[in-house]
Amino acid sequence: MKRRVRVEIDLSALVRNYGRICGHVAPLDVLCVLKANAYALGVGEYARALFAAGCRNFGVAEPYEAIELCGILEGRDASVQILSSVLPDEIGPMVALGVRLPVTDLEEARLLGAAAVRAGKCAKVHLKIDSGMGRLGILAKDAAATALAVSKIPGIEIEGVFSHCPVAYDPHDPFTKKQIALFKNVVAAIRAAGVNPPKIHMAASDAINNFPETAKPPFTMVRSGINLHGSFDPNGLRALELEPVLALKTRIAQVRSLPAGTTLGYGRTWCLAEDSRIATICAGYADGLPLALTNRGTVLIHGKRCKIVGRISMDYATVDVSDVPDAAAGDEVTCLGSEGGESISPDDWAAVKGTHAYDIICSLGSRVERVFVNKPRSF
C-alpha cells in the first residue's frame, strides 16, 4: 500500500540550489546546515547528495546530529561542525569523533583542550562571538583576549571565528549593518593579537540574500540552510534564483455532494452557501498542514486550486471540489508543490500562518513518508 501522505524531495533541485549558492558567494566556501534531520526531511540523502555535488562542510545543532552525520560521511573528506554549543559531558565524545566544536567561553575551551590531550587528538574549534544575537558566545569586548588565551591551550587549534545575526531577514534594519561592522572589528582585533583562523563566517541564508558584504573578505565561508530547500524568509530579498525542493502530496478519501446550509468540521466554522461537492483529503495537522489554513488555504486537485473549507483536523481536511467534477476517492492531492501550472510553496503557507518556511518544513509529521527522487548517481 502507498502511504496516505508523502513528501517528495527532489535531490537534483537541491543540488542545483547548492550550486547557485556557491556561484553567488564564490570564492567563499558554503557550509550546508543539516540540523534537525535536514529540517525533518532526511539528513542521510541530503548529505550524500550534497557531498557528491562537492560540499565538504556540514553544520548541525547538537551532538546526536553530529554522530549521525559523521556516520553517514565516514571515510570521506568532510567536516562536521556543531554550530550552537556543547555541554561538559558531551565534549569528550565529540572530541574523540573529530567534530568541529564551538567555543563559547574560556572555561569551555579548557575542558575541550583537556579532553583532546587525553584522547591524543587536536580539537579544531570555532570561536562563537556574540555580536548581537544575545544567545550564546563570547562577548565582542572579550573576543581578542579570549582568542589569545584559547590559542595557548594545549590540544586546541582555532580553525574559525563566527557569529550570527538576529534580524538579517530584514534588509532595511540598521542593526545588522552595525553588527557586521562590529564583527569585522572583532576579527581584526583577534588577528592583531596574533591569532589567524582561516575560517571566518557570519552569514546564514538571510544574510546571503540581504547583506552581500557578508560574502566578501574578511569572510571566507557562509552557512546555508533554508535556501537549500528553495525557501526564503518572507521579509527579505531574493538575491538567489532558487527552486522548490519538496512537494507534499496526499489522496482523496471521499467525495460527497452536500446541500446548502451544511456545516463542516470541528467548531462548524464553515457553512456551505450553496449545494457543493466536498472532498475529504487524507492529511491534517499531524501531517504538517497548518491549522491556520482553515478556511483560507488551498490544495491542488487535477491541476486546479481547491479551497480548504472547515477546520483542519488531525488526520483530515475538507476541500471544495465543485469545480473539479471528476474528482474521486483515491485521486492525488498536491498540498505543496506544482501541478497544472499552479503552485503552492512553504513560503505561501508561512505567509498565511504568520511564520517562516523553517516552521512549515520542520512541522511535516513523522508518519509522512519521505520519498527522494532524482538521486545522484555516485557518493
Image: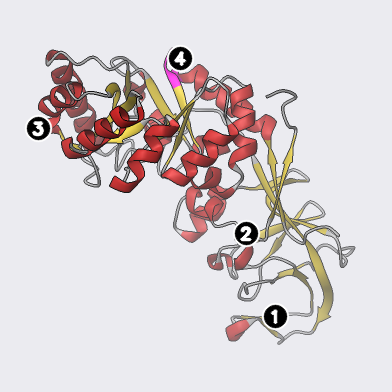
**N-terminal-most mark, 4 or 3:** 4
**N-terminal-most mark, 1 or 4:** 4
Q: Where is residue 200 in the image (x, y as percent from the top left)?
A: 31, 22
In which quadrant is the C terminus drawn? top right
**Snapshot quadrant of residue 115:** top left
Of residues 132 and 233, the one nearer the viewer is 132
For the residues marked 3 and 1, what is the alpha-carbon distance in whole angstroms?
63 Å
Provide the residue span drawn in magenta. 25-29
Where disc 3 sits, the SS reads helix
Residue to which mark 1 is pinned: 272
In which quadrant is the N terminus drawn? bottom right
**N-terminal-most mark, 3 or 1:** 3
Q: What's the amino acid at mark 1? A: Leu
Residue to which mark 4 is pinned: 26
Q: What's the amino acid at mark 2? A: Ser
Q: Which of marks 1 and 2 is in front?
A: 2
Residue 26 included in the magenta stretch of the image: yes
**N-terminal-most mark, 2 or 4:** 4
**Snapshot quadrant of residue 207:** top left
Number of the label disc, if any, that sits on residue 141: 3
**Do the residues bearing badges 2 and 3 touch, measured as CB atoms within 8 Å?**
no
**N-terminal-most mark, 2 or 3:** 3
Where disc 2 sits, the SS reads loop
